[in-house]
Image (tube, rainbow, N blue to C red):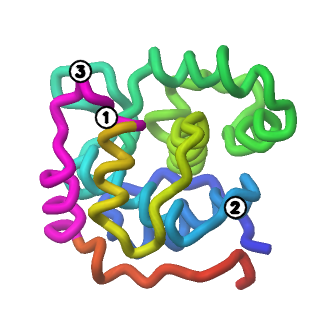
Amino acid sequence: MIQLQLQCIDNITPQIFTTRVIEPVLCHLENFSKSATQLLLGTALHESMGLKHRRQIGGPARSFFQMEPATHDDIWNNYLAYRDDLRGRVEALMSLPNADKHVELEFNDNYAAGMARVHYLRSPDPLPKSDDIVGHSNYWKKHYNTAKGKGTPTKYQNDWTAHGGPKVYFRSDCTV
């Protein structure tokens, strides 16, 4: 089993973010797949301009996943509140039991990755197949950015390529 370590790493590469944050968190949540890993990395690469911004420029969104506090709170109130096991797994990603969740979202990469995955779990649609970046970009647009968001699947795909997504090695399971 992969061990989780509290992570808040600046100047991080996509490979290190994948290996040290995304994959261990997905294993911890018992929700690992290569497709989920790629979707979370693509989301972070696009939303944070290549793992550069933990806080939205001129807006409320936080973390490399750029989740807004209102979305974060909605996940807790209307999804995790009804899923005890998953809620416990997400709570275990926090640095302290009573930590401010919005601070955790911005500065605790494990917690942010967990919340991003839970955000996608709210959708009944299956994930695209692994290595289907066009499918991931459309899934991101529909379920993360939404029809009202300014992002486009094409920009997501361009950011995936420009920020090194194709160069990342992805594990196939949770064994070390």
Element at badge 1?
A: helix
Element at badge 2?
A: loop
Q: Residue 38, how many percent across, how many down?
A: 43, 65
Q: Which residue is mark 1?
A: 145
- Give the residue drawn at x 14%, y 68%: 162
In whole angstroms, how far apart are the C-alphas of marks 2 and 1? Answer: 28 Å
Numbered-mark total: 3
Does the segment drawn in magenta span residue 87?
no
Element at badge 3?
A: loop
Q: Residue 63, how many percent across, how many down?
A: 40, 39
Nearer to us of marks 2 and 1 is 1
Q: Name the chief secondary structure element in magenta.
A: helix
Q: Which residue is mark 2?
A: 4
Vertical placement of residue 103 versus 118, above or below: above
Residue lying furthest front: 125
In the rendered image, which quarter contains the C terminus? bottom right
Q: Is residue 108 visible?
A: no
In whole angstroms, how far apart are the C-alphas of marks 3 and 1? Answer: 14 Å
Category of crowding for the residue at label 2, using alpha-carbon neighbours closer than 10 angstroms: few (below 14), some (14–19), many (at least 20): some
Category of crowding for the residue at label 3, using alpha-carbon neighbours closer than 10 angstroms: few (below 14), some (14–19), many (at least 20): few
Image position of 154 (left or right of 174):
left
Nearer to us of marks 3 and 1 is 1
- Residue 59 is labelled as 3
Q: Amino acid at mark 1?
A: Asn
- Give the residue drawn at x 53%, y 36%: 119
Q: Which residues are magenta?
A: 143-163
Q: Amino acid at mark 3?
A: Gly
Image position of 136 (left or right of 72):
left
